[in-house]
Image (cartoon, grey):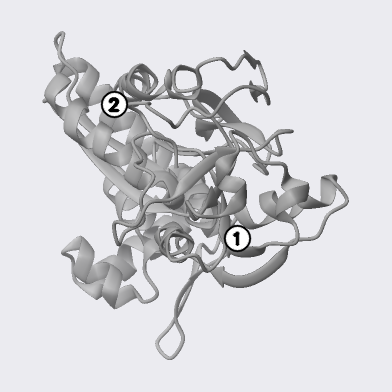
Amino acid sequence: MAEVTLRQLELFAALPDFDTLSAAAVHLHISESALSQAITGLEKAVGEQLCVRRKARGLALTPAGQHFAMRARRILADTRELVLDARRGEDLRGPVKLGCFASFATSVVPELLEGFPLRHPGVDLEITVGTNDDLLPALESGRLDVAIVYDMFLPAGYRRREIYATELEAHLHPDHPLAARSTVDLADLAAEPLIHYESSPSTLNTVEAFAARGLEPRIVARVPQIILVQALVGRGVGYGLLMSRPNVLPVSVEGRPVAVRPLDPSATASHVVAIWPEDMALTPRAAALLDYAVEKLGCYGHAVQPGRTHDAAGPATKGTSPHAGSGTNRE
């Protein structure tokens, strides 16, 4: 049986990120012919075609090649951990790659990027922001150690750790009649103009919240950005329905005030969670990062809701508005 080297695994593990062999070769600082020879040698060693190389069509991995590249990335990651464990004393050192769901990244990433490197200066924190469609494949391929996402509509096969509780809330212009209330019923909003935030899984979450009550929203605009929802609400174009977030002031990007009210009865109560493939172990650096995230953000879903109780599923539905006079505002 022919030997397979770590260098061959390193070269092949990079291929899923490129459409052509020449682009991969440039990134890997190797000639295209040398890269082609390394792939050919690897295919001879495993006895199976791992990729299709066509000059006119570029580079495509076979199903076996895709599986091989994913496993190669994990072997390389384990090798790096082995070396780091041998070098490490008491201080954590090395990389940790975190994915964060885009819609709440502005509420989470600054807290982590500011404080975690101060606590663990030997750790190189790299953050990728995207949707579930971006983050889940990156987790499976080993390009991310862990991702922070909403605990809703997730496929099987992931371990989870809760970061903070979250729930769907109404965002209203301060002069809207419903803004005078401490809580808002979804039934009272159905006939009002909705600025619909559209991004998976938020789109389906909102649709199902109305459907569960036998209601249908009156959508007047569909937008892919939370800041645009807030801007339109601040101008009185309509109302928004967004999941609550930490470290957010109730104002639009234009500085216009927005009234944020919890729904009663609660429409969606969930959690923001850290996830990683169940067949992968967290590195000590990734585990330390999650400890820090829970320490800094974990009390949010509970601490900012005076007078409200919680159960294991998330925030309860009754109580007064947590926004007035609170030092921590929800989105």
**CA distance separating discs 1 and 2:** 28 Å
Q: Residues within 10 Å of mark 1 (few under 14, many from 20)?
A: few
Tag 1: residue type? Pro
- Residue wearing tag 2: 81
Q: Is residue 214 left or right of residue 243?
A: right
User: Could you tell me how many numbered marks the image carries?
Assistant: 2
* Furthest residue in direction top, as rendered: 90
Q: Nearer the viewer, residue 193 or 205?
A: 193
Q: x, y percentage for residue 8? A: 32, 52
Q: x, y percentage for residue 173? A: 49, 55
Q: x, y percentage for residue 143? A: 38, 47
Q: x, y percentage for residue 117? A: 16, 28
Q: Residue at x 43, y 20 (%)?
A: 298
N-terminal-most mark, 1 or 2: 1
Which label lies toward us, 1 or 2?
A: 2
- Residue wearing tag 1: 63
Tag 2: residue type? Glu
Q: Nearer the viewer, residue 319 or 267?
A: 319
Q: Nearer the viewer, residue 55 or 255?
A: 255
Q: Considering the image in quadrants, where does the C terminus appear? A: top left
Looking at the rendering, which quadrant does residue 267 occupy? top right
Q: Residue at x 43, y 30 (%)?
A: 324
Q: Residue at x 68, y 44 (%)?
A: 153
Q: Is residue 270 above or below residue 141?
A: above
Q: Residues within 10 Å of mark 2 (few under 14, many from 20)?
A: some
